[in-house]
Image (tube, helix red, strand yellow):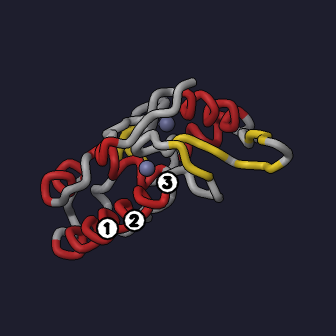
């Protein structure tokens, strides 16, 4: 996969999807400090939704410290499961239909079938949203 070979030791280094920092990816796509931050945001989002079950993503982003893109990203990556909240939808990346998990609506996911793997890759190569808080550094390509 994307592991780097360094003096015989296998390291799975990756840039954190959130802050861009280089870290030893152990089954995560964000670094430990961002995982912590994500957990806090998830808790915040859940609290907000408990009080406002009909809120949509925009409203949640206004009511919490999580940005719209962050919330969508958490849902897409399966970290936040919101099927019981009918208005927490975002547009399918292909056809724009309301979606509550993954990048594509059910129809598109089915239609693309095996194409999803390729699509995934394309998505990952796209520049992820970066906030670079904490003065995180970026590794040079
Ligand atoms: Zn990070
Ligand atoms: Zn679709």
According to the picture, the residue beneath numbered tag 1 turns out to be 40
User: Above or below — where is 11 with respect to 2?
Assistant: below
- What kind of element bears circle 2? helix
- At a point 47% along the width and 43% down the height, the residue shown is 21
Q: Which dot, 3 or 1, sits closer to the camera?
A: 3
Give the distance between the C-alpha atoms of the residues marked 2 and 1, in whole angstroms: 6 Å
Q: Is mark 2 within 8 Å of ligand 1?
A: no
Q: Residue furthest left?
A: 63
Q: Earlier in the sequence, mark 2 or mark 3?
A: 3
Q: Are marks 2 and 3 in contact (CB under 8 Å)?
A: no
Pick whichever, 137 or 106, lies toward us. 137
- What kind of element bears circle 3? loop
Mark 2, Cα crowd under 10 Å, few <14 / some 14-19 / many 20+, is few
Q: Is mark 3 within 8 Å of ligand 1?
A: yes
Q: Residue furthest front?
A: 7
Q: Are marks 2 and 1 in contact (CB under 8 Å)?
A: yes
> Which quarter of the rendered picture does the N terminus lie within?
top right
Mark 1, Cα crowd under 10 Å, few <14 / some 14-19 / many 20+, is some
- The label on residue 36 is 2
Q: Quadrant of residue 133?
A: top left
Q: Position of residue 81 (x, y in %)?
A: 44, 64
Q: Position of residue 29 (x, y in %)?
A: 55, 50
- What kind of element bears circle 1? helix
> Which quarter of the rendered picture does the C terminus lie within?
top right
According to the picture, the residue beneath numbered tag 3 turns out to be 31
Q: Earlier in the sequence, mark 3 or mark 1?
A: 3
């Amino acid at each position: 996969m994307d592991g780097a070979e360094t003096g015989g030791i296998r390291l799975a280094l990756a840039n954190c999807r959130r802050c861009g920092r280089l870290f030893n990816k152990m089954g995560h796509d964000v670094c430990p400090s961002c995982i912590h931050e994500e957990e806090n945001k998830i808790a915040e989002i859940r609290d907000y939704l408990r009080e406002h079950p009909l809120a949509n993503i925009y409203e949640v982003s206004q009511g919490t410290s999580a940005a719209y893109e962050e919330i969508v990203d958490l849902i897409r990556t399966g970290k936040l499961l919101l099927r019981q909240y009918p208005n927490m939808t975002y547009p399918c990346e292909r056809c724009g239909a309301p979606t509550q998990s993954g990048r594509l609506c059910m129809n598109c996911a089915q239609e693309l079938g095996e194409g999803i793997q390729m699509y995934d890759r394309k998505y990952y190569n796209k520049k992820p949203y970066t906030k670079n808080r904490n003065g995180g550094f970026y590794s040079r390509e």
